[in-house]
Image (spheres, helix red, strand yellow):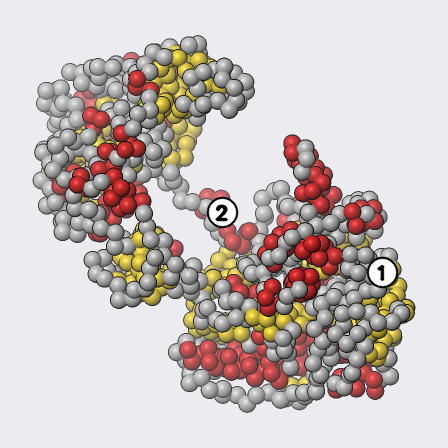
Amino acid sequence: MLLIHCPHCREMREEEEFSYSGEAHITRPLQPELLTDEEWGDYLFFRTNSKGIHHEMWFHAVGCRRYFNVTRDTLSYEILESYLIGTQPTITGATS
Amino acid sequence: MSTAVTQKNRTGSGSCTDASAPIQFTFNGKSYQGVVGDTLASALLANGVDVVGRSFKYARPRGIVGHGAEEPNGIIQLGSGAATVPNLKATQVELYPGLEASSVNGWPNVDFDLMGLIGAFGRLMPPGFYYKTFMYPKKLWMTYEHFIRQAAGLGATPVENDPDSYDKLNQHCDVLVVGAGPAGLVAAREAARTGARVIIADEQAQFGGSLLASKQTIDGLAATDWVTAMVAELEAFDNVQLLPRSTAFGYYDHNFMAILERRSDHLGLTAAQGTRQRLHRVRARQVVLAAGAFERPLVFAQNDIPGVMAATSVTTYINRYGVVPGTKLVICTTNDSAYQTAIDWHQAGREVVAVVDTRSVLDGDLVAAAKALGINVIAGHGVIEAQGGKRVKRALIAPLNDDGSAVTGSARRLDCDLIATSGGWSPAIHLSSHTGAKPIWDEQIVGFRPGASKQQERSAGACRGTYSLAGCLAEGASAGAEAAKLAGCGDGNMHFPLPTCEEYAQQPQQALFLVPHTKSASRAPSQFVDFQLDVTAGGVELAVREGFESVEHVKRYTALGFGTDQGKLGNINGMAILANALGQSIAETGTTIFRPSYTPTTFGALAGRDVNQLFDPERYTAVHRWHSDQGAKFEDVGQWKRPWYFPQAGESMHDAVNRECLAVRNSVGILDASTLGKIDIQGPDAAEFITRMYTNSYLKLAPGKCRYGVMLKEDGMIFDDGVCACLGENHYLMFTTTGGAAGVLSWLELWQQTEWPALQVYFTSVTDHWTTATVTGPNARKVIAKVCNDIDLSNEAFPFMDWRDGTVAGIKARVFRISFTGELSYEVNVPAHYGRQVWEQLIAAGEEFGITPYGTETMHVLRAEKGFIIVGQDTDGSMTPGDMNMDWVLGKNKAFSYIGKRSLDRSDTVRENRKQLVGLKTLEPADVLPEGAQIVFDPKQQIPMSMQGHVTSSYYSACLGHSIALAVVKGGLERMGQKVYCPLADGRMIAAEIVSSVFYDPKGERHHVG
């Protein structure tokens, strides 16, 4: 069970308070109608599924009800940082 | 003493037993006497009970082998009835007065076992036997399995509710110490003195671990006295929590440890008061693992005959329990530690026939001590076979070559009734493995030791492969100080002087995992590796011959380590035999991965208090009691209890629903719709935001107006639906489905926070704030008019899809003219505290019209008559608005590409032949199709038939006088009037005609009625 730092509450809280919300930094295309089916499909369905460093969104569902980003190692499950939506991670890895 | 009369192997009190305090118990229906401090295993051994169970596959008689969590044979069922517990280890069950236990295996009983005959044919049951023999014909497998399971037996689960209660405790600490043997005790003390919050847990009743059976001295004190002093010292710290009878069974992410504390199991089958067991959920900053090690048994022919035990277990029974489990002992060992067993046995006054050591040159201190007592030591030999039936009668020993791989001379017999073996030690690396640390094979200790730490933990003592007492004490103290420092307490230096103890010079052990026989493993009598699942050395070698190479595959093929003991004794021997058969090293072969739980854990403890009514919250509307008083049957919708229907005396559900439906269509009905999700949305950008979320536009929705909307996920599939009302400037109320309320709120927040934080809009869930009473039917207006005089109810002043503020039954109310029945409807919303009062006023006002309360079933029928969909019933996450024939709900001229819009143009969503919502009318009007029934076009097609869709909603319509169904059918909208067929599981084939999904009032005149 993970221990997660909520950057809004500025506290370590138990995983039970949060829900996972998928990969972070996936921006909705500004003009979806200009995209081909393939490009739109990439946005909709394709994720990096990184082995190692992964940036993902979490939602403090029974806390402050705010979304935020987390950098997590998908091998060790270690959480390396948490940061606000709209900001960039300080820790990045070779993702593939 | 009196107890010795019945307990032939009891020599007196051990360090943990009181021989003067007898306890009565029964095992397999026979009465016995044990003493205070006994485990069931020690008491059975004291009474000379040799056979405690039958093996799983061959049903061979089996006796106690070990003394703790490693025990593979003494698997018992405790008690009977609701509180019975299956698959406990006799070595871990503390004796209490009146304890009743029985073997889990053995039919009709352990001493005369019909299945034992199979044992005689054991050679005919190689690994994979069941799969190879019973798989064909396939349809008989269920029959075979039934008999195999019955014959094998793995205990009986209770069929009644557990009478006990359990709880959970969330804990935090700086240093968690697992294991209270020598290493754990000193680790806890070093950590405690820094002021760190310390929890020390041990699975046994008493702290001390191996010291409880030790005759060594520490700081001049007998080991057990030193333990007592240490425990007193720890108890004196107010920052230390001591948890005896507590098993750390799972080590999870971020230093989260699950510990099961058995609070009353030692007192009786059920807890006399309080909770039986408690789950400690511990988040530790640092962990010290001091879990000890298991002695590895030697593998030789017929090593499973009762009377073959682990040497250290024999020592434990003698010193700790005052039980000498035999008269004439033969020891077979590869190392020095088993000599202590010989010495203890000798000092207990019984005969040591010989210590058979596989090493040819012996010079350790304990060897010398044993020889000085006149104990016969035979070097360079091994026990190659045990002989006897239900108890060992003799050992067959033979000279071995230097590496122990072959017998070099003729065998001879030693008469005895107990063979104690030691093949070295296996560190208990289980918890370290749970974290993902990869075990490392260490030639020095002839065992796997913990791999590099993946979490904030370190191992100390025997679980790290350090077996000397002095070494354990030094490592424990150092680990405790280090853990405390890393947790932010102390300087990391040890504070207490290291306890002093005597050291024995030991010579290296021999790595030997299979004592050779004069015959090969495949020809010799069975050499058991895993007792509980009857895996033999020959079986492992056969698996290799059949092509298995990976340790994980061999494990699954042979079932090595799959028993309730999880191979604590057998795994290493099995892997070594596998490595040998593959011609590679143990390091290359590797080990299987240990996973939680370390020992079986009661489901009750995992559930804790989250059972029965507390399993999930139940939500009630403000009118719930009234429904209940009226005799309503309730239905679970999400967490809500909603009235399902209101049967009157003598009515079936069908009768009640028909009556309720007709009342709504012909006069007036009333529904408690309070459970619908309600989200209050405010902010200058509220309209823009809502318009991005729904398929249609809300930019021009004026105050007092409502609009029905459908919400899509970005993939274009319907996610939720409901009405959204404009309450005022920049203020909206969004209704969601009952089950979708929480998901919709999170969905809105997701988009606002992550994509469009610039939009100023705020969401508040107000579901519970309001009671909603839906008054519907041709007489609805007359009912409302009786209790509301400040709203002009005329169709012109208050048209369909409008809402008004007003006063209903004296209470400030919002009244919405929206309809889910197709009739003239008013949804009266009042603050929930007034809900019951207003509801009763509406009932009273409607009395002259026969106002009829109705439930969700009638609501479903009425909406299906109108072809209104229910998201989640008629849709399943793969349905677009077009599939539901609802293109009218798509805003054509919206500037912003609303959520899901682009996906409605994807090639897959615009393709031909998608499943589309249609109505079905059965050719036989009384036939009601089962929901979920598959639809085919050609009833004569061979199986497997081409499935063309399925029924999503189906009811009998009293109003129309025939059954109605909604269904999704491939290309359904192009197939109006065609016949389809529903082949049912019971063999019937129901024919139906595809019709419009709107069965009733297709022009929608009734809800517009003036």
Q: Is residue B303 visible?
A: yes
Question: Residue B817 placed where, x, y %?
Answer: 19, 26
Please identify, in this view, whether the residue under mark 2 or under mark 1 is nearer the observer.
1
x 31%, y 56%: residue: A56
Q: Amino acid at mark 2?
A: Val
User: Which chain letter goes with mark 1?
Assistant: B
Residue that label 2 marks: B611
* Numbered disc 2: secondary structure: loop
Q: A67 and B317: which one is in front?
A: A67
Q: Is residue B844 visible?
A: no
Question: Residue A6 placed where, x, y %?
Answer: 29, 61
x 59%, y 66%: residue: B588
* Numbered disc 1: secondary structure: loop
Q: Where on the picture, by quarter, is residue B393?
A: bottom right
x 64%, y 46%: residue: B157
Mark 1, Cα crowd under 10 Å, few <14 / some 14-19 / many 20+, is many
Residue that label 1 marks: B391
x 44%, y 19%: residue: B936
Q: Image height check: is B966 above or below B629?
A: above
Left or right: residue B708 versus residue B170 is: left
Residue B135's disc number: none
Question: Residue B570 placed where, x, y %?
Answer: 68, 62
Question: Residue B122 placed where, x, y %?
Answer: 79, 50
Left or right: residue B217 versus residue B237 is: right
Q: CA distance from mark 2 to mark 1?
A: 47 Å
User: Which chain letter goes with mark 2?
Assistant: B
Residue contact between numbered discs 2 and 1, judged by CB atoms under 8 Å: no
Counting residues from the start of the chain, the first of labels 2 and 1 encountered is 1
Q: B745 and B766: which one is in front?
A: B745
Q: B677 and B897: which one is in front?
A: B897
Q: Where on the picture, by quarter, is residue B792?
A: top left
